[in-house]
Image (spheres, rainbow, N blue to C red):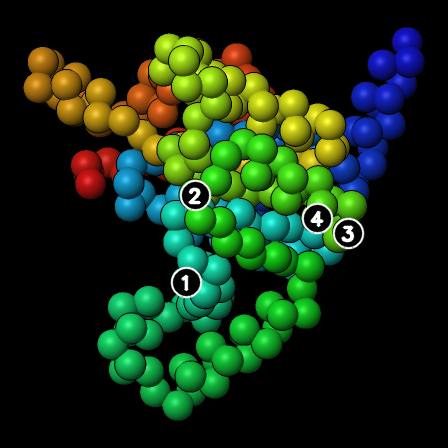
Amino acid sequence: PNAVDRAAKASGDASARIPWFLPEITQALGDIRRGNLIGLMSDSGGGKTSFSLQQCRYAASLGFKSAFFSIEITEEEAALQAAAQQSHISLGRIDACTLNTKEKGDLEAEMMKAADLPFYIVGFGECTLSDIRIKAEAMVKSQGLDLIVIDHAKMIALPNPKDMFAERVNALYRGLKALAKTLNVAIVILIQRNDDWKRRWQSSGAYTAFRPVMGDAYGGGSIKQSLDVCFPLYRPEPL
């Protein structure tokens, strides 16, 4: 009964649920909930980072304290990419220095606006699950985080080097799930898609071979035991 009461109370508490920036995802998956580990999978270059930066920025605009743990790109790159998305300016044009006066003003205004939001970008070099845990615990204590996005799983050094690869990957996801529950925050882990779909395409030639399945995730289908929700970003054409 106590568990049912707590669940009912949490369901009615809007502060415990973080909406997705795309209503279609909320309709399909529901809100992001504290204590959950959510996997977001795509191919390399498939839009995981862009998607998650938009989600962090949107959550922060609603008052949810959000952190983007960037292992793959620098803090500066992540901040610039987030500002470019909100200003509807391509990174290619920023890199080529071809912005007009209005676009430069829009980009600067967005970066100033983002500085006032509870949106934190944290850069990591090589890191382990322990490094992530230490940083997350410190930020939850000092900032009171609601959402953490980690970019991405394959960049985190695996624990237990003497164990088999599959078990080491599963230990990573189990550790992230335990961290989400212990800190009572939602964690979104970005997951690289492997190349199994290419073998399916070569063996069958079917167009449906491009569609992602759980077995395509870094670590294989067994990781679903640690994930509360997992969904892919999918483009009909292969990257």
> In terms of depth relative to the viewer, which is nearer, 231 or 67?
67
- Quarter-of-image position of residue 201: top left
Q: Residue 74 versus residue 239: which sits nearer the camera?
A: 74
Read off the residue under disc 3. 142
First in sequence, mark 2 or 1: give its number. 1
Q: How far apart in space, not on screen, are marks 2 and 3 (Cα)?
A: 24 Å
In this view, the residue in front, 11 or 85, is: 85
Residue 64 percent location from the top left of the image:
71, 50
Image coordinates for residue 116, horizontal then vertical, percent: 68, 70
Using the rendered view, name the quadrant where residue 85 is placed.
Answer: bottom left
Alpha-carbon distance for marks 1 and 3?
A: 25 Å
Measured Cα–Cα span from mark 3 to mark 4:
5 Å
Element at label 1: helix
First along the sequence among labels 4 and 1: 1
Q: What element carries label 3?
A: helix
What is the residue that sits farthest to the front in this orientation? 162
Q: Please give the name of the residue rendered at 82% of the width and 36% of the height, measured from the top-left corner.
A: 13
Q: Which of marks 1 and 3 is nearer the N terminus?
A: 1
Q: Pointer 3: residues within 10 angstroms few (<14), some, or many (20+)?
A: few
Residue denoted by label 1: 77
Kind of residue at disc 4? Met
The label on residue 126 is 2
Percent from the top left, x then y, of residue 204? 11, 14
Neighbor class of circle 4 (other Cα within 10 Å; few <14, some 14-19, many 20+) is some
What amino acid does circle 2 point to? Glu
**In the picture provided, is 183 more to the left or to the right than 134?**
right
Residue plotted at (73% across, 27% down) = 182
| Mark 2 closeness class: few <14, some 14–19, many ≥20 residues within 10 Å | few
The amino acid type, in three-letter code, at marker 1 is Glu
